[in-house]
Structure formats: structure tokens, C-alpha cells
């Protein structure tokens, strides 16, 4: 299993979290932003139909697994042959942990606590792989990290 990137975008397409795992040196920041814009356009247009799956092929070499929670899109890009459901479930776990950690998370929490958002992300995903799937262990680690501050 391999994750290329994880994105959290709002409905207008503004990035709230961007984590690239493949560190492709050939991609410039402008090309990365162009990918983000294309992905938002693709996913937001699919969102209007209630009968579409949460998976879409992107550029014939990546599969996007996404889920919308309130006004935010959580998106993972994976290899075409990987299991979509495991990544969709990991996105749900990520949102559940955020919701417990921030006590009913909203977009403002992500904007003003971006550093916490990234260390929560790093507890779940490491180097493009799912590292931890236990919600209790994750919350325990996050509590420990908060006690260090």
C-alpha cells in the first residue's frame, strides 16, 4: 500500500492540509497546486450527485479516495491496485480522532491549530503507509504529547 498525498480542502478549494509522501523532485510547487485545483474540480463536481462512489481514477495512475464531512473534503491518493475501503476507513478514523481531540472539530480548528493537525496526521500515517488504526492508542499518544507542552 502506498499513499502519494493526503489533502483536506474546503468547498471553495482552499487547502487546509496538504501532505505529499512521494517527494517527487520533478514536481514544482505550481504543478502541485495545479493538481490540487484539478482534484477539487473533479471531486466537487461529483459531490452534487448522490449516486456516485467515493473513489475516482485520477490521471490513470492514481486512485482518489475521498469523503466529505460538513464543508471539508478529506482526500487520499493511492496506487490503482490498492484497497479503496481500507483508505476510506482510515480517513474516517482520522476524522473521528480529530473530532474527539478538538471536541467537535470544525474548519477553524484546522486553520488555527495546523501544527496539531499535522502531528495527528503523522501518528496515523507514516511515510505513505497507514501506521496506527487504534483510536484509543492514538488518543492516548496525543494526550501524552499534549502533556509535554
Image: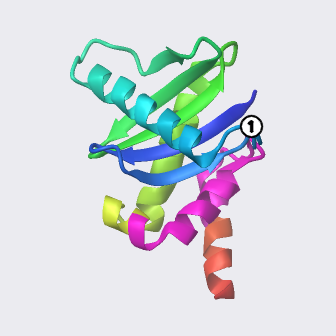
Q: Is residue 49 left or right of residue 67?
A: left
Residue for point 56% across, 34% down:
76
Quadrant in the picture for residue 147: bottom right
SS for callout 1: loop
| Neighbour tally class for label 1: few under 14, some 14-19, many 20 plus, Cα within 10 Å | few
Q: Position of residue 96 (x, y in %)?
A: 46, 50
Q: Position of residue 103 (x, y in %)?
A: 37, 67
Quick one: 62 or 110, which is closer to the camera? 62
As drawn, 5 above or below 140: above
Outermost residue, bottom side = 149
Residue 126 is one of the magenta-drawn residues: yes
As drawn, 135 above or below 81: below
Is there any visible trace of residue 106 in the rendered image? no
Look at the image and tell me in which quarter the C terminus lies: bottom right
Is there any visible trace of residue 123 in the rendered image? yes
Which segment is the magenta one?
A: 111-139
According to the image, label 1 marks what residue?
26
Quadrant in the picture for residue 21: top right
Amino acid at each position: 500500500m502506498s499513499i502519494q498525498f493526503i489533502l483536506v480542502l474546503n468547498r471553495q478549494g482552499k487547502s487546509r492540509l496538504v501532505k505529499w509522501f512521494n517527494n517527487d523532485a520533478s514536481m514544482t510547487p505550481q504543478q502541485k497546486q495545479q493538481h490540487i485545483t484539478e482534484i477539487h474540480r473533479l471531486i466537487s463536481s461529483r459531490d452534487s450527485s448522490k449516486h456516485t462512489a467515493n473513489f475516482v481514477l485520477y490521471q490513470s495512475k492514481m486512485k482518489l479516495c475521498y469523503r466529505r464531512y460538513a464543508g471539508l473534503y478529506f482526500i487520499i491518493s493511492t496506487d490503482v491496485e490498492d484497497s479503496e475501503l481500507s483508505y476510506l476507513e482510515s480517513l474516517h478514523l482520522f476524522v473521528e480522532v480529530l473530532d474527539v481531540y478538538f471536541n467537535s472539530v470544525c474548519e477553524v480548528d484546522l486553520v488555527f491549530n495546523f501544527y496539531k493537525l499535522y502531528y495527528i496526521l503523522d501518528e496515523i500515517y507514516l511515510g505513505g503507509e497507514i501506521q496506527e488504526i487504534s483510536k484509543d492508542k492514538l488518543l492516548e499518544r496525543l494526550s501524552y504529547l499534549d502533556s509535554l507542552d
